[in-house]
Image (cartoon, rainbow, N blue to C red):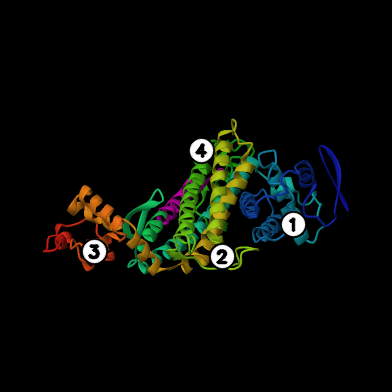
């Protein structure tokens, strides 16, 4: 064991613990959610500390020995090591101070180990005096959040692109399949299944573009602004160098914000990013819900497509297979939408020069990014790429529907088609069969009016209805 002290007193700590007294107090104060600070934020925070150490080395405020050890320790944390040393609950007071303290202590004590010294030797290398030199939680925490979000946005853009491509592949594969289009869950007009998947692909394409563009909103960081964005307590040369080192270390296009007070106090940029994520979630929910419906039954539902069978669907009904991936994706999407509401409120509740609820905003934003990234990947790999079509079922439903009736309206008029439709029902025949039997339209011509090529045309041309003007038509 070792003992550490602060302004509030003394606490015993495990001798080999990399965390220190500030982390221990925070862990004791916030036993709230049982959810730790998201690892993406911790890894990003380590890069912030490394950049600050290098800036302090450049300006002569840190010697090479300490700076090198701090940077080496930061690299380990950024690589995901020492995760068990980050004890603070995600729901913490202090606008992120406890997370900053936890990172300072782990980096300092690991740096001490790398120098052959014992953790807790703050006289030689201090969490606050060296690792946190010329910094505040108020500039480092939002900077780390921006880094973490930028990294996850880049990954999300990649999984969204793969989903778009998978949907486009199905658009091509199903271009020849005519199906019934539906509005308000009722039969409407004929279309192709490829058109359905093409519409999904377009929606996801917009998500991909929005995700790419919204990265611009958070690439400016408040690093160097210290407590309220004025840079008080930090050397001017350090302020200019810190963001430059951060860009080189991470490979991300970050730069120092022009107005550091604004970047410290206001969180609207995160709300904008979250809004983009909510739109993406809405599209995923829509597509997932549609696929469940199109695959429903299969014997007593629509059954037009088949989703990959991944697991048994019931502990009592043999042979039942559920649409588990669309359901998983739908739940992730709903969570993201809920997070957006929380992020919006959190940003609006910030007061004066900082946002006291930034830890909650960070937790929700990074969770949303994580959920969308992984849900999109699962949706692509375990659902969309394996979708097949039941062409016979699609044709059966087209034949039973009133799709042909709507196609005939421009040539025959609404009232005439209504009478033909009523007569076909009375005779117990499909509209196509009834028109063939009464000499109005040959079945081959009816099939031509419902051909996939015609479905893909925008509007109609007069010659499309020549078959109705021929003798017997």
Residue indicated by mark 2: 321
> Of circles 3 and 2, which is in front?
3
User: What residue is shown with label 1?
Assistant: 84
Secondary element under disc 3, as helix, strand or loop, is: helix
Q: Nearer the viewer, residue 443 or 461?
A: 443
Answer few, some or many: residues within 10 Å of disc 4's Cα (few below 14, many 20 plus, some between 14 and 19). Answer: some
Residue sitting farthest toward the top: 352
Q: Nearer the viewer, residue 394 or 276?
A: 394
Instruction: Tell me what residue is drawn at x 49 percent, y 61 percent.
Output: 297
- Residue 228, given in percent of the width and then of the height, sits at 60, 35
**Which stretch did the figure color magenta?**
204-222
| Tag 3 near tag 4, CB within 8 Å | no
| For residue 80, side relative to residue 282 (left or right) | right
- The residue beneath circle 4 is 259
The overriding secondary structure of the stretch rendered in magenta is: helix
Judging from the image, what secondary structure is the residue with disc 1 in? helix
Separation of disc 2 and disc 4 at Cα?
A: 56 Å
């Amino acid at each position: 064991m070792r003992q550490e002290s602060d302004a509030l007193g003394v606490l015993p700590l495990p001798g080999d613990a990399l965390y220190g007294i500030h982390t221990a107090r925070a862990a004791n104060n916030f036993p709230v959610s049982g959810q730790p600070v998201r690892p993406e934020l911790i890894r990003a925070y380590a890069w912030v500390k490394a950049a600050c150490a290098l800036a302090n080395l450049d300006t002569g405020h840190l010697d090479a020995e300490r700076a090198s050890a701090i940077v080496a320790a930061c690299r380990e944390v950024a690589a995901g090591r020492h995760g068990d040393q980050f004890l603070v609950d995600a729901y913490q007071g202090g606008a992120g101070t406890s997370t900053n303290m936890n990172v300072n202590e782990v980096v300092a004590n690991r740096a001490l180990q790398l120098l052959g010294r014992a953790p807790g030797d703050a006289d030689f290398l201090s969490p606050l005096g060296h690792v946190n030199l010329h910094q505040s939680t108020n500039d480092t925490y939002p900077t780390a959040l921006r880094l973490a979000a930028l990294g996850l946005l880049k990954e999300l853009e990649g999984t969204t692109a793969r989903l778009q491509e998978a949907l486009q592949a199905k658009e091509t594969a199903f271009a020849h399949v005519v199906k019934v289009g539906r509005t308000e869950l009722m039969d409407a007009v004929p279309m192709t299944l490829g058109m359905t998947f093409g519409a999904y692909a377009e929606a996801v394409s917009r998500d991909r573009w929005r995700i790419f563009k919204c990265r611009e909103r958070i690439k400016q960081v408040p690093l160097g602004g210290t407590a309220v964005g004025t840079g008080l307590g930090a050397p001017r040369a350090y302020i200019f160098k810190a963001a430059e080192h951060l860009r080189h270390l991470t490979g991300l296009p970050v730069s120092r914000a022009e107005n550091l007070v604004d970047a410290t106090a206001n969180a609207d940029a995160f709300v904008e990013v979250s809004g983009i994520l909510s739109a993406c979630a809405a599209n995923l929910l829509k597509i997932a819900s549609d696929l469940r419906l199109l695959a429903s039954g299969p014997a007593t539902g629509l059954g037009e497509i088949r989703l990959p069978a991944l697991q048994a669907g019931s502990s009592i009904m043999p042979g039942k297979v559920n649409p588990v991936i669309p359901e998983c994706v739908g739940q992730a999407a709903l969570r993201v939408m809920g997070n957006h509401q929380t992020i919006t409120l959190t940003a609006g509740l910030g007061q004066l020069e900082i946002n006291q609820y930034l830890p909650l905003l960070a937790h929700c934003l990074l969770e949303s990014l994580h959920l969308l990234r992984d849900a999109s990947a699962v949706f692509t790999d375990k659902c969309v790429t394996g979708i097949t079509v039941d062409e016979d079922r699609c044709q059966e439903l087209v034949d039973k529907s009133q799709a042909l009736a709507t196609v005939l309206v421009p040539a025959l008029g609404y009232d005439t088609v209504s009478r033909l439709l009523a007569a076909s029902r009375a005779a117990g025949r499909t509209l196509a069969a009834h028109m063939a039997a009464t000499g109005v339209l040959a079945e081959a011509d009816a099939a031509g009016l419902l051909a996939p090529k015609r479905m893909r045309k925008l509007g109609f041309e007069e010659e499309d209805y020549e078959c109705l003007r021929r003798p017997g038509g």
